[in-house]
Image (cartoon, rainbow, N blue to C red):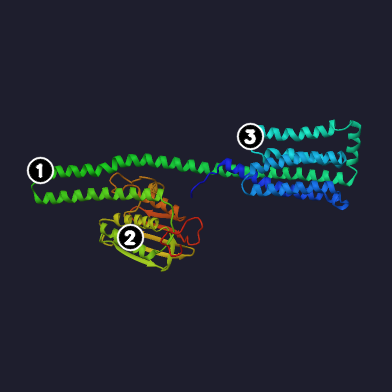
Amino acid sequence: METTFKDPIIESYKKRQRLLDYLIKGASFIVFVATIPEIIYWVTDTLLMVSLILGIFVFCFFLNKKGHTNIAANLIVLTVSFLVFVQCIQTGLSSLVFCFYMPLLIGIPFIIDNRNIVLILFHMFLPITLCSYLLFVNQPAAEATRQLASGFTNTNGKINFLCALSQCGFFAWFIIRDHSISQKLILISKSKIENKNAELLKTNSEMDHLVYSISHDLRAPIASALGLIEISKLEADPEKLRYYEILKEACLRRLDNFIYDILNYLKNNRLGVEISPLSIKDEIYNSIEMNSIYNENVKVVVECEYDGEIYTDKNRLRMILNNIISNAFRYAKPNILDKTIHIRVKNNYPSIEVSITDNGVGINKEYMEKIFDMFFKTDEKTKGSGLGLYITKEAIGKIKGSITVWSEKGVGSIFTIVIPDLKDSKEFPLAADSPLD
């Protein structure tokens, strides 16, 4: 699955946009609640001021929705700063309207673009200056103290104070919530980065092995074929020439198989999973037909309990079946007549189980933990590339399946693969030729 990383600048912008949206809605509600006494007593001047404030809030709300968050944020902050000042001049300190400077100061760093520090400092300096003027300059200290004291006893002052306090609480809640979400995103991003690094390390290690193997295993059959060609030029005996032709064919087949494995490795490693319906029975018979040329004396028995279609990645399933079945043909015991491969398909909805049993040469116990390693061979005389079972294990992992193996030297092997039906999977796309696409 592809890992995506979000642009922090875009995420910061979206966060400010959401916060400003909440702020405008919350501030509009609080302004309305705080104006209830004025509505009851029909204080015309105050109601006109409130109507202007709400009108500006609505305008800024639509600006923010249209993506003009920076303009809306600056307009909101300036509007609140000056209108609170004007309202406090009109109603006096006893209304405690200046308390709304508290949530404004808390919210400014979060709704103004934090890349512009000068603008943030200006917006914070402005309400502090205006509030200081109201408290210490606008009127004598004794009168200011008396009005402040009376503000906590009259209804209007209490409502304004509680509304401002509620707005502070809202910002505190938002900051805590945002911090919690940010921490989770950091942990998720860290996990994704670690997984990506692990994948890159694994890929680098595989590429190192691949380069070495290509330089060795790809060149070896070419060198052998060239040597046989040189010998053939000096040979006149027809029987020996036919023998050399057989050897050259073996070299070319080995080269062809190695290239085929390399291509399968690249396909499995680079291509995404595409789901399409297929008949597991047909795929098994196709694989048997392709690999029977390696040993025509092997008797194959297929026992299929599932005749329906299964949704999985067709190319990877073919890699898996081809690698296991071809091994069963290639590593049959050379000195026995009863060479058999028994393939059984069981329906374990929502998956199917395919077991491939042979009575071939088997695998030594000390090699069992290494047979799925990249380029592992039991000995240097092995004709394979050492990629087949590695690709099989990787391909099965890609389609969310599993593989287990039992083997005993001289007795044979049993490979059991579990293939889940991915028809309802939301993780993988349907192939373009799928009837459900």
Instruction: Please report whichever mark, 1 or 3, sits nearer to the chain's N-terminal start.
Output: 3
Decide if residue 96 is on the left or right side of residue 229: right
Q: CA distance from mark 3 to mark 2?
A: 65 Å
Rounded to the nearest angstrom, the CA distance separating label 1 from label 3 is 84 Å
Using the rendered image of the protein, determine whether residue 427 is visible from the camera's viewpoint: yes
Earlier along the polypeptide chain: callout 1 or callout 2?
1
Quarter occupied by residue 101? top right
Residue 413, picture quadrant: bottom left
Which numbered dot is residue 116?
A: 3
Q: Tag 2, which secondary structure?
A: helix
Q: Is residue 364 visible?
A: no
Q: Assign a secondary structure to mark 3.
A: loop
Disc 1: which residue: 234
**Up/down of 216 relative to 383, above or below:** above
**Farthest residue in the left direction?**
236
- Mark drawn on residue 308: none
Image coordinates of residue 223 in percent, x first then y, are: 22, 41
Residue type at numbered disc 1: Leu
Nearer to us of marks 1 and 3 is 3
Which is nearer the N-term, disc 3 or disc 2?
3
What residue lies at 66% left-to-right and 32% top-to-bottom?
Answer: 118
Depth order, front residue of 133/208: 133
Q: Residue at x 18, y 51 (%)?
A: 246
Q: Residue at x 79, y 40 (%)?
A: 84
- Name the front one of labels 3 and 2: 3
Q: Residues within 10 Å of mark 3 (few under 14, many from 20)?
A: few
Label placed on residue 287: 2
Question: For the image shown, how many numbered marks are present on the structure?
Answer: 3
